[in-house]
């Protein structure tokens, strides 16, 4: 009986040893997922959404809405919207101009928030503001290049506004108003992005890398 038990134990240990040395079987590959449906917004829907956003921003009646920079940004967004409407037959140009109009409204949003931002001196706020302004410094330096490509006088005015917003952000940073500094830096960068989109919209043969 004892010998039989010993034999069984040895057999179990032997099998366990073989199992340990056997490489694990690769897991069954997951079933291929069906391709996601491409739901790129229709041109008219996108245009309507941007128009609605502009209408909402123009309807703001708080004292901050009287800020000169806020008004300039919305005026430029409206001008770019008119350009977008006139270029519906050129899908690339139409899309770039809608992006530019949206970017100008992004900047307007940030300016509005900056006017109401509380004075903060938290270390995290300091780092975030410093990072944004550092990146913004280089973006502002690209503004004149985009203006030259677009050949648009209004773009030149926007480039000066981007520089002004950056300088305001730096002043807020020096005054330890880090929340305000970050928002103004983001506003400046959004204006430069709008300029970039406008420059792209004037490129007759955009380079597409495949």
Image (tube, grey):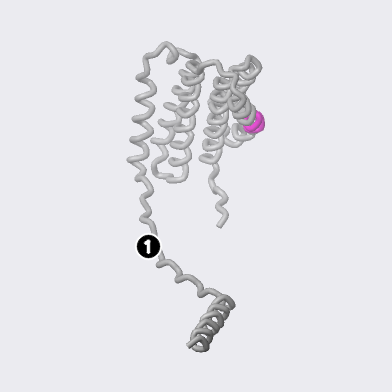
User: Where are the magenta residues, as a range?
Assistant: 134-140
Residue drawn 46% across the image and 25% down it:
109
Residue position for label 1: 34
Between 51 and 203, the one nearer to me in the picture: 51
Residue 196 lies in the magenta stretch: no
Between 35 and 204, the one nearer to me in the picture: 35
In the picture, measured across the screen, residue 163 lies left or right of residue 88, that is: right
In the picture, measured across the screen, residue 136 lies left or right of residue 111, that is: right
In the picture, measured across the screen, residue 134 lies left or right of residue 95, that is: right
Labels in figure, total = 1
Q: Does residue 66 sit above or below 14 in this rendering?
A: above
Image coords of residue 14 (percent x, y): 56, 82
Q: Can residue 124 be seen in the rendering of this structure? A: yes
In the picture, measured across the screen, residue 176 lies left or right of residue 88, that is: right
Q: Can residue 157 be seen in the rendering of this structure? A: no
Please, what is the dominant secondary structure of the magenta stretch? helix
Q: Does residue 22 sit above or below 177 in this rendering?
A: below
**Residue sitting farthest toward the front:** 1
Q: Secondary structure beneath disc 1?
A: loop
Image coords of residue 20 (percent x, y): 57, 75
Image coords of residue 118 (percent x, y): 51, 16
Residue drawn 50% across the image and 18% down it:
117
Where is residue 17, by image quadrant?
bottom right
Between 46 and 109, the one nearer to me in the picture: 109
Residue drawn 55% across the image and 52% down it:
208
Where is residue 123, by image quadrant?
top right
Image coords of residue 184 (percent x, y): 56, 23
Residue 138 lies in the magenta stretch: yes
Q: Does residue 22 sit above or below 128 in this rendering?
A: below
Which quarter of the figure is the C terminus placed in? bottom right
Between 83 and 136, the one nearer to me in the picture: 136
Query: Within 10 angstroms of label 1, few (less than 14), some, or many (20 or more) residues?
Result: few
């Amino acid at each position: 009986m004892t010998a039989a038990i010993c034999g069984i134990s040895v057999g179990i240990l032997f099998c366990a040893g073989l199992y340990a040395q056997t490489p694990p079987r690769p897991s069954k590959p997951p079933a291929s997922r069906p391709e996601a449906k491409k739901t790129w917004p229709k041109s008219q829907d996108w245009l309507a959404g941007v128009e609605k956003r502009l209408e909402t921003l123009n309807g703001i009646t708080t004292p901050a809405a009287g800020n000169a920079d806020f008004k300039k940004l919305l005026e430029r967004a409206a001008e770019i919207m008119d350009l977008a409407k006139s270029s519906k037959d050129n899908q690339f140009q139409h899309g770039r101009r809608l992006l530019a109009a949206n970017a100008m409204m992004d900047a307007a949003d940030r300016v509005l928030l900056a006017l109401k931002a509380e004075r903060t001196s938290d270390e995290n706020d300091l780092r975030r503001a410093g990072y944004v302004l550092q990146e913004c410094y280089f973006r502002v330096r690209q503004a004149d290049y985009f203006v030259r490509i677009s050949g648009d006088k209004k773009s030149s005015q926007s480039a000066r506004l981007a520089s002004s917003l950056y300088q305001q952000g730096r002043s807020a940073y020096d005054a330890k108003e880090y929340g305000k500094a970050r928002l103004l830096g983001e506003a400046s960068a959004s204006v430069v992005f709008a300029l970039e989109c406008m420059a792209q919209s004037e490129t007759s043969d955009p380079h597409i890398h495949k």
